[in-house]
Amino acid sequence: MKDVDKYLKNLATEQKTEVKRLLDITINSIPEAEICVTYGMPGFKYKGKYFIAYAAAKNHYGIYPGSGAILGLAKELKDFDTSKGTIRYSLEKPISENILKKVLLFRKNDIDSNK
């Protein structure tokens, strides 16, 4: 958690608030996920596997759930800028808690089914 706090400390207030919101939704939705830093970003592991990561950039926020969630939830994510393993959005058009929870559940189910 110390490395996550270090990441957050370097963000502007607005960015810090948003990344904390994403982290809190993840912790509350998938409490068995372990917080960590992955690829230099705050993220989570689940059952020892990469689960999701979050980042704040100059003009957007990034959610990195891997390509399976992007493909599997294409309809729900149609209003966001996506690429192979990334969802990007701005605070003017934020990702809702409901959609993020769908992404988290998709990832959890994906890992659970690939034992």
Image (cartoon, grey):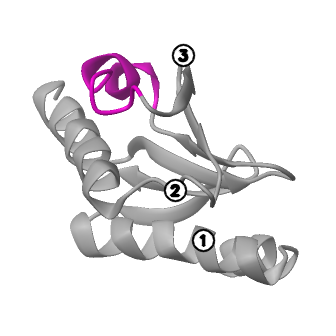
User: Which is nearer the N-term, disc 1 or disc 2?
Assistant: 1
Amino acid tagged 3: Lys
Q: Nearer the viewer, residue 59 or 3?
A: 59
Question: In the image, 115: left or right of 16?
Answer: left
Mark nearest the camera among 2 and 3 is 2
**Quadrant position of residue 103:** top left
Q: Which residue is mark 2?
A: 94
User: Which is nearer the N-term, disc 3 or disc 1?
Assistant: 1
Give the residues in magenta.
66-78
- Measured Cα–Cα span from mark 3 to mark 1: 23 Å
Q: Which residue is mark 3?
A: 84
- Residue 63's place in the image compared with 10, above or below, is above
Residue at 49% x, 74% y: name it.
21
Residue at 28% x, 33% y: name it.
76
| Mark 1–mark 2 CB contact (< 8 Å) | yes
Residue at 18% x, 24% y: name it.
114
Mark nearest the camera among 1 and 2 is 2
Q: Quadrant of the N terminus?
A: bottom right
Q: Which residue is mark 1?
A: 18
- Measured Cα–Cα span from mark 2 to mark 3: 20 Å
Residue at 24% x, 63% y: name it.
30
User: Which is nearer the N-term, disc 2 or disc 3?
Assistant: 3
Q: Examine the rendering and report whether any part of residue 3 can be seen.
A: no
Amino acid tagged 1: Glu
